[in-house]
Amino acid sequence: MIQQKRWILALFALPTLLFYTYFFISPVLNTFYISFFKWDGIGEKVFLFLGNYMELLKDPIFYSALAHTLYWVALVILVQIPVGFLLAYFIYQKVKAYKFLRTVYFIPVITSSVAVSLAFSFIYEAQFGILNSFLKLIGLDQFTTAWLTDPNTAMTAVSLPFVWNYIGLMMVILFSGLQSVPDELLEAGKMDGVNSWQKIAYIILPSIRNVLVICFVLGISYAFKQFDYVLLLTNGGPVHQTEVTGTYMYKQGFDESRYGYGNAIAITMMFIVIVFTAIVNKVLQSKE
Amino acid sequence: MRLTDRVIIMATDNTVLKSETVPNPPEERKPVMKNHKPYKTGDTTKKVTANILKYTFIWGYFAITFGLFVWVLMTSFKDNREIFSSPFGLPESIEFSNYIFALFEVNMSMYLWNSLLVALATVLFCFILGSTVSFVLSRFKFRGNFFIYMLFIIGLTIPLQSLIFPMFFKMHTIGLRDTLIGLIIVYTALNLPKTVFLLVGFMKGIPKEMEEAAIIDGCNYWQVFSKVIIPMSKPALATVGILVFISAWNEYIFATVLISSDAISTLPLGLASFQSSHLSEYGLIAAGVIISIIPVLIVYMIFQEQIIKGMASGAVKG
């Protein structure tokens, strides 16, 4: 038996717990706390109770930012996950050079958002960017535009790097799900003569439901927290056309010195992510 | 010595046992879906069309992803005149002048060093703080165990970027804003939930006999931890280390909020400020992008399998 007292174990855990409480738990609670105040970061805090949240409910820019974030959620569900799934599915079928393809598909995931943003700013660049050069090359000069500052195209342009960035991650997660689909099921399907679509819809998708839930939850949380691209490419402009909740929060705090309001946005984001996660779990897992 | 021998024997036994019971790795699985038989005549056109669509899709997506990288690489060897005259063309000559200028005139080498320091220190801190608490949480039953574990799990569900304001003021109050150690502390705190989740999950799977053998040999808690649990957790530590390294290396939002001095900027910060100060020197910016990607690409090439699997498993709750 160990000759030491059990409380020695506390010495192992305590430094981490203190560190984590001070540098993680306390900031989380602080976000809540400050969201009830009007505070410019230096002066006195003025208690508003739910005042910030009331203002948020009537703030048209917040609603448009939220709409843009929800647009990203839709892109995750309609583009990112389906494309990730198809890539995973084809790679699972062991197409030629599948390992090489998987390696390349995953590169965006490990690339920093700043590098990706700069690369995309090159694509959209008005004079030599790939997009405009290509359009000129094939004689469609009338469609060339300054993609990031044209209000009609800015939101789409700023969404592309976000969608592209995580397709590789979705692919990898879905691939690991596909590997766990039991062979017997696929064999049985084959004997029943199902076609490819039936196989995907009735055999594969139901078998990987749990992995799909992970992809949805992850995608939704990324849509809410990943605002690097907007901050770097358009900073929310032109006139809030590309504002997402993240950039709006950031700017309310650091540009407008309205930290109470910024924290209220942060709490609202946390709340929405948690509600969405709960809904996805409920809808996709209830059939078990 | 006796202890280590025994542990090694048990460890090898264990792995042998495991590799025998684990079903064949999927790579070797017989491809069930692939039809090697010659197509029936009626199906031929349909199958061929399906195949064409499939290959167009996977190689088209490949072309977009790989092409973008190659295009930035090409651009990094060109000067502005060449970029404007032939944006898609191969560079006239491979000139490293952009790289040399980026590394030594605009201090990319300094940013590289700062990023390396921050990323490695964050990994080290996460190892120390994460493994000790994971050891206690995974190997011992006590009241409050579940509660403490949940504190870390809750950390996984919070969108971390929503903590920028309190983090900023906390660092400001304790005088660590605009210091590298402050940034390292923040990154460690943000990565701890993931670290603890992955390590506890792994350590729970280490058989009890391992530490019982050590205890019989008269080890104390510290020795059980350092001589049995840590060596056996190497695969999980590797995964955690790589994930934390990449996330610290790439992080931008917290860095831009906390760091304002150029001399201690990390690579993403340097790159972003670089863009605004050398706005129209595209070749130079492209070289900066390539310089920032190369180290993480090397890490990725070496630890590819581990990274891909780790991201997939870390994502399960991360």
Image (cartoon, rainbow, N blue to C red):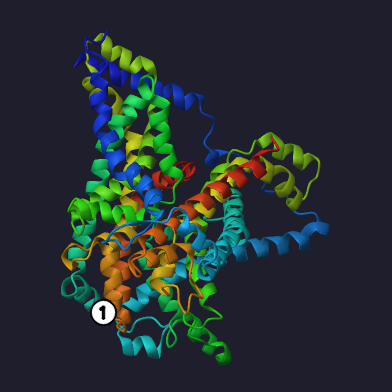
Q: x, y percentage for residue A2?
A: 25, 11
Q: Name which residue lies at 39% across and 24% down.
A: B144
In the figure, B73 relative to B141: above or below? Answer: below
Residue underneath mark 1: B277
> Which residue ends up furthest to the right in the rendered image?
B42
- Judged left or right of residue B260, residue B16 is right
Q: Nearer the viewer, residue A271 or A280?
A: A271
**The C terminus of chain B lies in which quarter of the figure?**
top left
What type is the residue that disc 1 sits on? Ser
Write down the quadrant of residue B99 in the picture.
bottom left
Q: Tell me residue A281's x, y (percent).
A: 61, 42
Picture layout, residue A69 above or below residue B224: below
Q: Position of residue A43 (x, y in %)?
A: 27, 61
Q: Is residue A251 above or below residue A99?
A: below
Q: For mark 1, name the chain.
A: B
Q: Residue A185 appears at what percent x and percent y?
A: 71, 37
B260 up-or-down from B225: above or below: below
Kindly tell me whether residue B292 is visible in this rendering: yes
Of residues A94 and A28, the one drawn nearer to the viewer in this rendering: A28
| Disc 1 residue crowd, few under 14, some 14–19, many 20+, Cα 10 Å | few
Per the image, label 1 sits on a secondary structure element best described as: helix
Q: Residue at x 38, y 58 (%)?
A: A260
Q: Quadrant of the N terminus of chain B?
A: top left
Question: Residue A72's quadrant in the figure?
Answer: bottom right
